[in-house]
Image (cartoon, helix red, strand yellow):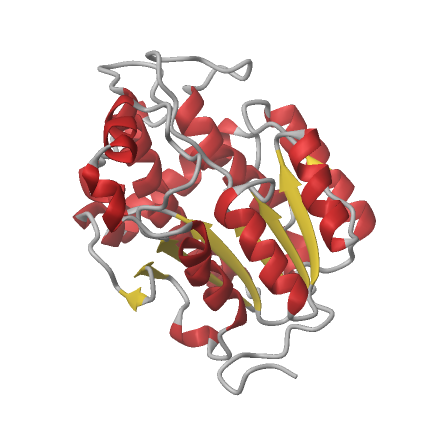
Amino acid sequence: MPHPDERDVRGLVMVITGASDGIGAIAARRLHERGATVVPVGRSPEKTARVAAELGVEGLTADFSSLAQVRDLAERLRERHDRIDVLANNAGGVFTGGRRITEDGHELTFQVNHLAPYLLTRLLEDRIAAAPGARVVQTASMGNLLGRIRPEHLDGTTGRHLDYGAYCRSKLLNVVFTRGLRAHYATVGIDAVASAFHPGVVTSSFGRDSAIAGVLYRGPARRLFHTPEQGAEPLVRLATRPDGAAIDGRYFHRHRADGPLHRQGRDDALARRVWERSAAMVGLPA
């Protein structure tokens, strides 16, 4: 039986990207234990297969540096499920070594952390609409505070490039996308909830190849980090909270609503511009 402070998720279809490791894998296990039909999605076939085998489910793989693979993933999900109750856009990364351009012509961090989940969410819209009270949960970061969005240079292929700056900008885009998604669902009449969260600074493999993060992971500050189990808690909580309306359009700093946020994260006009530009980049109507 569900906890009194949780909705009953037994049988609900929950797609979790970035579920081959870290907080995504832990969230997949915890939601599976609650009776959800979990679909783990990861980039690594081997790691994803291990998580899927542990849960006794089918895992799916996709590399978000290729939008063709994102479209293929959406098609496979559509073939298997006529509804999606929770889509957790958890996949992402910090990429070092300077500006890298994907096969689709976008800066790598921007594409993996923002444009790919934007595309996946849009392609699954009818499956989300088929599940009243569905939720889209975005893994963001307090790094959004150090980001800055310039709509005229949204994809990061021009202008100055700093590896960690690109990451922070992409995390701010996660929050702005959440705001835009909420407005979109209200406009088209879809009964779904959008929220974003910062999991805490987590001692997982995420970001360890970043020069800044690498120093922190090896230094005394590591003692202040959250475990992956703790990092997964906000994702699980947003998927299972009974009061969907209370989390709609909001950014959580772990479990605290309306956490520290860059002023652009509250800009509805910017959210609309980002939505429109992102739609044009992936060839979808706004």
Q: Is residue 157 visible?
A: yes
In the image: residue 50, left or right of residue 23: right
Q: In this view, does 92 lie above or below 90?
A: above
Q: Which of 276 and 16 is in front in this view?
A: 16
Say above or below: 230 vs 214. below
> Percent x, y for residue 216?
24, 34
Q: Where is residue 267 in the image (x, y as percent from the top left)?
A: 24, 51
Q: Of residues 214 and 82, which is closer to you in this image?
A: 214
Compared to 96, does 58 lie above or below? below
The residue positioned farthest toward the right in the image shown: 79
Q: In which quarter of the image is residue 59?
A: top right
Residue drawn at the location 59% of the way across and 41% of the way down: 120
Which one is nearer the viewer's eye here, 229 or 184?
A: 229
Residue in the image at 63% along x and 79% along y: 8
Residue 163 horizontal/vertical position (percent): 29, 21
Nearest the eye: 76 or 130: 76
The residue sitting at 37% across, 47% down in the picture is: 140
Asked if residue 235 lies left or right of residue 68, the reply is left
Quadrant of res 11: bottom right
The quarter of the image holding the N terminus is bottom right
Q: Where is residue 96 in the image (x, y as percent from the top left)?
A: 35, 18
Vertical position of residue 92 compared to residue 27: above or below: above
Give the farthest residue toward the bottom.
Answer: 4
Q: Can residue 131 be seen in this view?
A: no
Please report the residue visible at 45 percent of the width from the left and 19 percent of the height from the top. 106
